[in-house]
Image (cartoon, helix red, strand yellow):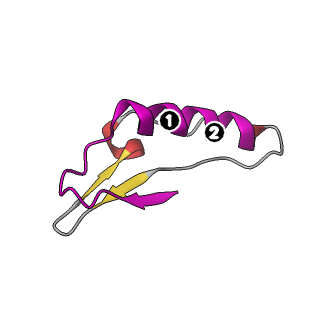
Amino acid sequence: MVHNHPSGNPLPSLADQELTKTLSKALQLVDIPLLNHCIVNGSGFFSFFDSGLMKND
């Protein structure tokens, strides 16, 4: 999953973190893994997987 932060700060908000958890749980019900969630802006990105906020077990 990817979305943007037009504000320029790619760090995830608490709402972004909660959405990721909720979506991951919902997708598990239909056997679809959420492998990563990236937030992009004009100069960089944040990866939930790379930061350790998301694990692919």
Q: Position of residue 31 (x, y in %)?
A: 80, 45
For the point 61% across and 47% down, the residue is: 34
Task: State whether residue 22 is above or below residue 2.
Answer: above
Q: Is residue 26 magenta?
A: yes
Task: State whether residue 18 is above or below residue 46.
Answer: above
Query: Label 2 to label 1, Cα distance in Å?
Result: 11 Å
Q: The residue tagged with tag 2: helix, strand or loop?
A: helix
User: Residue type at mark 2?
Assistant: Ser
Q: Position of residue 3 (x, y in %)?
A: 42, 59
Task: State whether residue 50 is above or below residue 4.
Answer: above
Q: Is residue 30 magenta?
A: no
For the point 25% across and 43% down, the residue is: 11
Which badge, 2 or 1, is on the more N-terminal residue?
Answer: 2
Q: The residue tagged with tag 1: helix, strand or loop?
A: loop
Instruction: Provide the residue designation for mark 1.
Output: 55
User: Residue type at mark 1?
Assistant: Lys
Count of marks placed on residues: 2
Q: Position of residue 41 (x, y in %)?
A: 25, 63
Closer-to-camera residue (35/13): 13
| Horizontal side, residue 23 vs residue 17: left or right | right
Instruction: Provide the residue designation for mark 2.
Output: 24
Q: Position of residue 27 (x, y in %)?
A: 73, 44
Image quarter (top left, top right, bottom left or bottom right) of the C terminus: top right
Q: Residues within 10 Å of mark 2 (few under 14, many from 20)?
A: some
For the point 40% across and 54% down, the residue is: 38
| Horizontal side, residue 25 vs residue 40: left or right | right
The residue stretch that appears in magenta = 1-27
